[in-house]
Amino acid sequence: MMNTPINRRSLADEVANQIQTYIQSGQYVANQQLPTEPDLMRQYGVGRSTIREAVKMLVNAGLLRVQQGVGTFIEQNPVSNETLHQRLKRAESKDIDEVRQLIEVKIAQKAAINRTQQQLDQIEEFLNQRIQASLDGKTEECIQADINFHLSIAKASGNEILADMYEAFSTRLKSWFLQIYPDTSTFIQTNDLHRSLFLSIKEGNEEKALNDASRILRH
């Protein structure tokens, strides 16, 4: 493994973060022995105390285990200690989008029940931005407005966990959408469906909101 010089700020944190990255990327695998202290000191260009502090952090986080007299090893299931945001960094865009779509149907239904007037105004504002950007052929602006539209619906659902999950998924999608949508033609085709979804939420019609969200996803 090539040497990785690091910034001198928060040395133990930096070393721990880089080792964690190696674990989560699969460069270190379960039950593999971590390099010795002298090897880690050379790799990161830090002292013994820094290495020991970094290892202690990772042991406390459940990523490493120390076997006295033997060495330090990668824990059996380190991925289980990842946060959702950390896990999403490793996920395929198509997998993230699939989960996002499942959530969209439920948040539309919940938003029809729990939305406030202020939230409706926000949803409509992003809808209008989406429509205008699609008609103007501004792909990046249209994609961002589309993401904001659905995210504002998630926040109107009244379920903070659903909203947080949707936001976490959505932050990964913009670059992928830019790859698969070369222009705004698809967005133009679904403008009416998005307008219908907004009206369903505004009218408090949860069944129609659910159906409209499903129609958008099928398209």
Image (cartoon, rainbow, N blue to C red):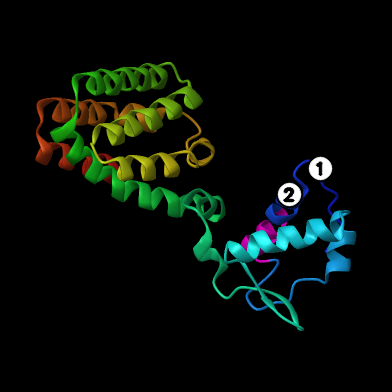
Of 40 and 169, which appears nearest the observer? 40
In the rendered structure, which amino acid carries the disc numbered 2?
A: Glu
Callout 1 touching callout 2 (CB < 8 Å): yes
Task: Please identify the quadrant where the C terminus is shown.
Answer: top left
Residue 104, placed above or below residue 83: above
Q: Please tell me how crowded label 2 is: few (under 14), some (14-19), or many (20+) other residues with Cα within 10 Å.
A: some
The residue segment tinted magenta is 18-26
Q: Please tell me how crowded label 1 is: few (under 14), some (14-19), or many (20+) other residues with Cα within 10 Å.
A: few
Quadrant of the image occupied by residue 77: bottom right
Query: Which residue, given by chain and number where applicable, does mark 1 sit on?
Result: 7
In the rendered structure, which amino acid carries the disc numbered 1?
A: Asn
Identify the mark at residue 149; answer none if there is no mark. Answer: none
Instruction: Give percent across and percent down for residue 133.
Output: 41, 19
Query: Which residue, given by chain and number where applicable, does mark 2 sit on?
Result: 14
Instruction: Give percent across and percent down for residue 104.
Output: 29, 43
Of 66 and 1, which appears nearest the observer? 66
